[in-house]
């Protein structure tokens, strides 16, 4: 005699459990298949002082070790007790490095500070593009550091939204 399948028994089918369990893990697994970028906190340059606040240009480098281009999505960072969110509209070529200047506003009484945060990016590949656009996969890489404080006026030239203006490459010592 064949026993009818009840609704609560349908969830006990091994294939169904595997599918449900792994549906959440697939985006994380796909994002982990690629090489994650490396973010380096380099320096901070004072840009302008307004009242009791100081604007800084926080210089960071993003290293792409993978063989495909890396599309940056956004920055979230905590600097000197302040939280900053910044959209990153930049692409890092394969096996290359770009330098970014992020604005940070802190009280002018702060002379040394630390930075910690995350850079979100789109993992390489068409499937990862789709997962990112649909909200299933938002890979991030954490970073932290203490920027070297530079003299005013040493801030690099700003870059265009598409990243086509001066790309500051580190100079050889």
Image (cartoon, rainbow, N blue to C red):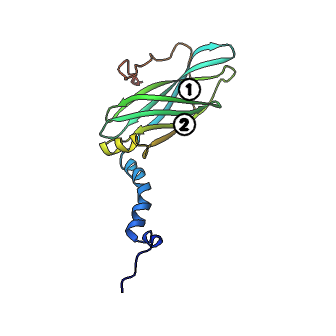
The residue sitting at 40% across, 70% down in the picture is 14
Q: Which one is in front, 123 or 10?
A: 10
- Residue at mark 2 to residue at mark 1: CA–CA distance: 17 Å
Give the x, y percent position of residue 140: 46, 41
Q: Residue at x 44, y 71 (%)?
A: 12
Q: Find numbered disc 2 in the image and state the secondary structure of the residue it sits on.
A: strand
| Quadrant position of the C terminus in the picture | top left
Where residue 62 sits: x, y (%)?
42, 33
The residue wearing badge 2 is: 117
Q: Which residue is mark 1?
A: 148
For the point 40% across and 19% down, which residue is it? Answer: 160
Up the image or down, 130 lies above or below 106; here it is: below
Q: State the residue lying farthest toward the bottom.
A: 1
Mark 2–mark 1 contact, CB under 8 Å? no
- Identify the mark nearer the N-term, 2 or 1: 2
Circle 1 packing at 10 Å, graded few (<14), some (14-19), many (20+), is some
> Residue 1 in the image: x percent, y percent?
36, 87
């Amino acid at each position: 005699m064949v026993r009818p399948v009840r609704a609560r028994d349908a969830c006990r089918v091994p294939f169904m459990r595997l599918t449900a369990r792994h549906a959440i893990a697939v985006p994380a697994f796909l994002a982990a298949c690629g090489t994650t970028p490396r973010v380096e906190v380099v320096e901070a340059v004072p840009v302008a002082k307004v009242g009791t606040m100081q604007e800084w240009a926080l210089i960071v480098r993003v290293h792409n070790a993978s063989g495909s281009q890396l599309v940056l999505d956004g920055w979230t960072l905590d600097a000197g007790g302040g939280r900053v969110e910044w959209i990153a509209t930049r692409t890092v070529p394969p096996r290359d490095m770009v330098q970014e200047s992020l604005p940070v506003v802190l009280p002018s009484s702060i002379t040394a500070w630390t930075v910690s945060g995350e850079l979100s990016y789109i993992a390489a590949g068409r499937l990862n593009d789709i997962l990112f656009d649909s909200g299933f996969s938002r890979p991030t890489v954490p970073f932290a550091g203490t920027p070297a404080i530079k003299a005013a006026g040493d801030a690099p030239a700003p870059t265009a939204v598409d990243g086509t203006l001066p790309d500051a490459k580190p100079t050889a010592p």
